[in-house]
Image (cartoon, coloured by chain):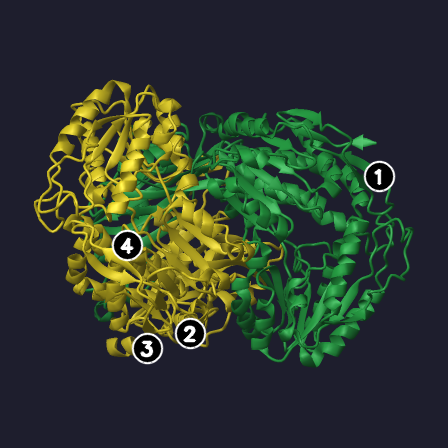
Chain colours: A yellow, B green
Amino acid sequence: MQKLANFVQDRWIEGTGDGRVLTSAVTGEPVATITSAGLDFRAMLEHARGIGGPNLRKLTFHERAEMLKALAKHLNDIKAEFYALSTQTGATRRDSWPDIDGGISTMFVFSSKGRREMPNDHVYLDGDVENISRGGSFVGQHIYTPKLGAAIHINAFNFPCWGMLEKLAPTLIAGVPAIIKPASSTAFLTELMVRRIIESGILPEGALQLVCGGLGDLFEHLGCQDTIAFTGSKYTAEKLQQHPRVVGESIAFTAETDSLNMSILGPDAAPGTPEFDLFIKEVRNEMVAKAGQKCTAIRRIIVPAASVSDVVEALSETLSEVRIGHPANTDVDMGALVSQGQRDEVRERVAALAAEAEIVFGGSDDFDLVDADHDKGAFLMPTLLLCEKPLNATAVHSVEAFGPVSTVLPYADLDEAIALAKLGDGSLAGSVVTNDNAVARALVLGTAAYHGRLLVINRHCAAESTGHGSPLAHLVHGGPGRAGGGEEMGGVRGVLHYMQRSAIQGSPETLTAITHRWIRGAEERDPGVHPFRKTFEQLELGDTVLSQPKKVTLEDIDQFAEFTGDTFYAHTDEAAAKKNPFFEGRVAHGYLIVSFAAGLFVDPDFGPVLANYGIDKLRFLTPLNHDDTMRVRLTCKQKTLRAGSGYGEVRWDAEITNQNEEIVAQYDVLTMVATESNYASLQ
Amino acid sequence: MQKLANFVQDRWIEGTGDGRVLTSAVTGEPVATITSAGLDFRAMLEHARGIGGPNLRKLTFHERAEMLKALAKHLNDIKAEFYALSTQTGATRRDSWPDIDGGISTMFVFSSKGRREMPNDHVYLDGDVENISRGGSFVGQHIYTPKLGAAIHINAFNFPCWGMLEKLAPTLIAGVPAIIKPASSTAFLTELMVRRIIESGILPEGALQLVCGGLGDLFEHLGCQDTIAFTGSKYTAEKLQQHPRVVGESIAFTAETDSLNMSILGPDAAPGTPEFDLFIKEVRNEMVAKAGQKCTAIRRIIVPAASVSDVVEALSETLSEVRIGHPANTDVDMGALVSQGQRDEVRERVAALAAEAEIVFGGSDDFDLVDADHDKGAFLMPTLLLCEKPLNATAVHSVEAFGPVSTVLPYADLDEAIALAKLGDGSLAGSVVTNDNAVARALVLGTAAYHGRLLVINRHCAAESTGHGSPLAHLVHGGPGRAGGGEEMGGVRGVLHYMQRSAIQGSPETLTAITHRWIRGAEERDPGVHPFRKTFEQLELGDTVLSQPKKVTLEDIDQFAEFTGDTFYAHTDEAAAKKNPFFEGRVAHGYLIVSFAAGLFVDPDFGPVLANYGIDKLRFLTPLNHDDTMRVRLTCKQKTLRAGSGYGEVRWDAEITNQNEEIVAQYDVLTMVATESNYASLQ
């Protein structure tokens, strides 16, 4: 039998001893053994910190994002192997899709966001410059830098691939090495995927280590730069969070734990409406997918009292059609729970729920199985309960039966629906099914503080909805209270979990040197030639062109108004303009001012500047009256190389002043500038 | 003698029993007694959640910010009383300034940021819409809503006013009620300020409660919507963080604890340079201010080995000039520590440091006092130590002597300076004094992950620098590891600590209804009249004007080029434009396109639209070739009433398309629109 290996200090090592036997969820047969006994966990941490971290931090955010993309492509090419093995976890092909394809797609999204939303550099800037001095010689800027430790990823059994990849992707983008500990029962699938990742040679040395089995004394060696991302039971999370090293070193700990997720059927969504049908379909899917073993599955079905019997009837009908059995059989809708032990636990919890609620569907051990054996596999019938007095109940709001189990809770009015939702004491995901946006707003704002994610389903978005139970890489995943209080993913938000935010103060010149974003007040360099004549590589932050002054006459304003058709009264009608509290009379159009500014700062001949692709944060601060004189300063502010494209993005700081040195307008001009070699080829 | 009262459920209540006697730091005489015995802490929490929270959440962010401003003004008017009492804490007038004026100024900054950086609404939007479906019928948006619990503020003794106000300001802006527990030894000053706050009648019922004394069984009643902000010792923080309710309910806990803050003298900053003198001055100030009782004070003075004797000599000289004594005497530079108990603790810690380091200045009990008595007040001599082998030392990096005590640590090179900084295991604040920006970058990026705030001081910013030890409301305050891992302030960042982030998914129309920001894909309403004819109140999100099409000819491009002077080759030179990889030939100027768009969408006559004050996120997505036809859609996207000003800000979503329905440009147009009554008065 296969003994799962551990990937330690860039070598595959077997743990000592026989280890624990892992069995197939479907057949009960042994699949592998698992043990991490004998590993040197302290050395693993030091390897991550001393080798993996420095290797990753040599790269920019973009370079790490490219690495992630290569990895995602590689895994996508060979995913058939993962699907085949996934059957042993009890998952149907449809169940495996969010785990395998979903995990790979999460890496693609993080790669894309890393390149689009982060700089091609080593420091991530958080927000704008803070003006903290009157004269502007002392300013502030928040930055994020990678934590100089290891990220410990502790994953749950239900998503052996996605669970690993959704944590790994932001960690790698951040520039932090990971030590991954999958849940034992499905670790065989994680181990296979890690093998393929390592074989690809895409990751640098030390970036990833794997522990199949317990974490031994690893926690004893944690330090203040390490981070922990945990998915699993609240009980285990609490134990780990209270570990003396975790508390003593103030280790960033994000936990995604238990959750009694709710879905509310709106009062408008009566039987016969599209929303009623969408609701039934959503609840059915959430009960059946992964045999209900999803942290985000709907556990509490909150419905108008008047619709209870219709909901129970419709759900019972659709659940009665669910075919249960061997997940490899394509006729099967629902596979097995991960183990018979897990099944027994769910049965116990159903019993606890049944003390407060009536079982209205399922709950029996006598049901048909396709290609499978009740005694060998961990099969369970979908089970629906009804709790008539849910405001006075406790178990239905606190006992998470981690299987195809859910409870219907009637509500009288919206306030009661909100009160019921809150009794879950913090959840990962909630949903509202309604076609009344006032109802949607009331329910969402009434319950948002208890939820990490909420979705509103109606006829307009149903076709494209990703569903109640699907965390997306773009959006945060996690929730308050019982759900653990953590947050993962959410694009860059998830990356920042592995980084430290610091407020930096100093002169504009010093902060420009540190952040690689030019700050007003820093040196305005004489570039020698017009900066539009410089290639991307030649441009330096601070390169400045200060234009000649230009007088703007009434004739200019008239001509612009006539030419563009923008005859807005403030530009064309002296009397009307004077009525305006901001103007003393006719003023130049904002669009005229920035157009003239471009005329003043451009160098017209063919050169490395390829295009102006946009403008950011344009603000008109002082009106430009006719016969005022304007001039513009344009300064190279930030450079973002688009590797492989032949160009880079250059952001320029533009400032227009009048004859009294008052600031007329400030904005960023965005251009694409050719690289040296590309420019040579264009000429 | 005064017995400090508690403000409980909107009534002033004395605790039962005699309580503990608080003494003057200067004279040792009793000032007040303190006890919270007998309070009903559960009822306090319920009062905050049931009365204070709903009262605050009726208001918008702007309304709460206005309330804060009124409070700050009120406190500013009556601050003399606080200064007078502050002397009893041992603080000189200069020491009291950051506490009293600093606290009030923090409220002003939060009020200003609340109005400038948050919406005049109830939901704070985090980031842009996330496009999570191909067809755009299902989108995502992160929002923040107030946590529906109480904020527990546990403050340290050293800043009885600022410590309260810097936590209270973001909490109130968030819409969350606070229960404040000051440290006992200086609670008399906090109690006075809370009395004045309550008397002002500015806060709604339930918004603020005060506990003078212990928190009793309050922690037993905490729930998942409560938050804790703690400043104090790491030891106490750890104890509270491990409380079963805190862990069980995943309560957001931000801790600001111990810190062995460092300041590094750059290798360039040799004796004789302005930076050397700035460094000596900074270290002296940080040792002497508040008698060194600042969480951010410099405890570790990291200097080039070659400069050690010069640094010790210069510091000893300046410290020898420090006059110690009664803080009310204006000749005095340094007052008393908070209590004799605190002084004894500092002495013990100096002894611990002296095992690894040599005392090179101070450390004696025999020093002159102005207007004060050694036996009655808690006076201590500034004490400087020198640790010759700091890389092998432990106490100098871990023992925080919370008084006028600091240790000089020599370094050989920058790597060693960084290594020494890191040995503090996480700090609140660090500084680098250098005029070499390459050194600044190396030291800042090398140590940022260990610091919540870092400043670089040089001759260019020194005059305006707020100094190593001053947290600012604009910037985050907190630090990793030993410093507690927390974060406070930082403008809106600090407000968000008291709110829950949730990812919301649904149709653009639904999300528009929830967020009050119109999303592309939501209904484009027919406003009946041109939307420029509507007042602020009349405008509705979604109000849209779709322009007529307009053909852009070569003549237009030529005329615009000639008129503006923007003769950039892509617009004027067919052959050169063709060499450009993005264009097939001459294209219209971006500025021409947006100018024409304005001409197409404006309604020119005098009306409620007062001004276009800016543009955001303009992106040119498809080039507009000559003879292409453009049209523009302008849709009311977001409304922000500027209460009391007679207008509101209206953000419009603009989209320019070509004859093939390709998107040429997207941007936000920002306007000021008169309110109904103001518009009537203007006409």
In this picture, residue B332 sits left or right of residue B587: right
Q: Residue at x 58, y 38 (%)?
A: B152
Report helix, strand or loop for mark 4: helix
Label disc, if present, on residue B30 of the rendered structure: 1
Residue B122 seen: yes
Circle 3 sits on which residue?
A676
Looking at the image, is mark 4 or mark 2 nearer the viewer? Answer: 4
Label disc, if present, on residue A185 of the rendered structure: 4
Residue B272 seen: no
Q: Residue at x 15, y 51 (%)?
A: A93
Q: Give the spatial CA distance, label 4 vs label 2.
A: 30 Å
Q: Are marks 2 and 3 in contact (CB under 8 Å)?
A: no
Q: How many marks?
A: 4
Label disc, if present, on residue A484 of the rendered structure: none
Circle 2 sits on which residue?
A51
Q: Is residue A238 above or below residue B605?
A: below
Looking at the image, is mark 2 or mark 3 nearer the viewer? Answer: 2
Report helix, strand or loop for mark 1: strand
Residue type, numbered disc 3: Glu
Q: Give the spatial CA distance, label 2 vs label 3.
A: 34 Å
The image quadrant of residue A313 is: top left
